[in-house]
Amino acid sequence: MIMGRAACAAIMLAHMLVVLPSASLASPQLDPAASVAKGTQALGRLIGGYTLVDMNGASLALRDYRGKPLVISLVYTACSSVCPPTTQHVIDAVNEAGRMIGLDRFNVLTVGFDARNDTPARLTQFASTHGIKSPNWRVASADPATIEALLGDLGFSYRAVAGGFDHLTQTTIIDGEGRIYRHVYGENFPLPMFMEPLKDVVYGTTTPFTFSGIVDRIKFICTAYDPGAGRYRIDYGLVFGSVIAAFSLLVLGGLILREWIRSAHA
């Protein structure tokens, strides 16, 4: 059975609070509800055009990502508990999005938020170990002030504890204008929780009257999640229905135009 957009939107948002095993019982922990509320308040916010440094030591300006949607995954390279499986799950989600939407339609950025320790060398090792290879995906960090400002924009909650950080597993989808569109929480989030908002920001809410714009609108409407297969596919029944509806509108428009011309010359 195919799950359409309405059913996908009805799936409950899952979130997970990461508590590192090395943290003592006395260590203060984050309030998950307050942390999610903070992230919710950031929705619609324009992120700053901060300059980061990628794993090759090259400057990376967030303002240069404007024009395409951007997925930001937040990790720290010394994490041995949740960051690795979260990254693998994001890789799977990005691969599926690339298959259905196209990797050229969006970008991905893994940000190491441990500013003092997420050096280019460690970022390189993290990317190599976890198999980050997509051509639209970069791994970066920055100085403490820049990272703090970026995390503030994203509404990301974390706290230093013994041996690491206590933090939410947060993946953020940003639209082509640089505004925060959706947060996805959890290390094993349902695929539609990632794909549906990404489809929104890739295909947009308005359709230019061009061939590519019409194709995008058909893909937007007709790409559906198959929970049995655990992946997306084109629902050709919806495609056929959309084509019939569009043809009917054209015929109706032609008839109305013909009658208008006839009455004008009567």
Image (spheres, rainbow, N blue to C red):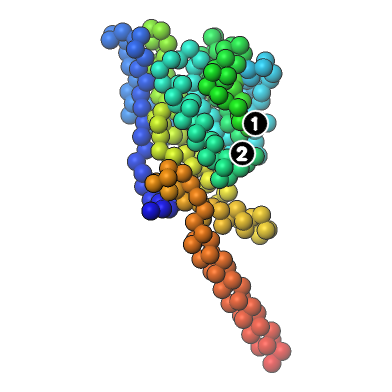
Question: Is the residue marked by circle 1 packed among few (<14), some (14-19), or many (20+) residues within 10 Å?
Answer: few
Residue extending furthest toward the left? 25
Left or right for 251, reference 21 = right
Q: Is residue 241 above or below residue 52?
A: below
Q: Are marks 1 and 2 in contact (CB under 8 Å)?
A: yes
Q: Horizontal and vertical percent for residue 188?
A: 40, 31
Q: Earlier in the sequence, mark 1 or mark 2?
A: 2
Q: Horizontal and vertical percent for residue 173?
A: 52, 36
Left or right for 172, reference 28 = right
Which one is in front, 262 or 11? 11
| Amino acid type shown at disc 2 | Leu
Label 1 vs label 2: CA separation? 8 Å
Residue extending furthest toward the bottom? 266
Quadrant of the rendering where the C terminus is positioned: bottom right
Q: Horizontal and vertical percent for residue 82?
A: 41, 21
| Amino acid type shown at disc 1 | Pro
Q: How many marks?
A: 2
Quadrant of residue 99 within the rendered picture: top right
Residue extending furthest toward the front? 229
Q: Horizontal and vertical percent for residue 229?
A: 42, 45
* Element at label 2: helix
Q: Which residue is mark 2?
A: 103
Q: Is residue 261 above or below residue 65?
A: below
| Residue at 28% over, 8% down | 26
Q: Which mark is residue 123?
A: none
| Residue at 28% over, 10% down | 25
| Residue at 58% over, 19% down | 128
* Element at label 1: loop
Q: Is residue 6 visible?
A: no
Question: Is the residue marked by circle 2 packed among few (<14), some (14-19), or many (20+) residues within 10 Å?
Answer: some
Q: Which residue is mark 1?
A: 135
| Residue at 44% over, 24% down | 85
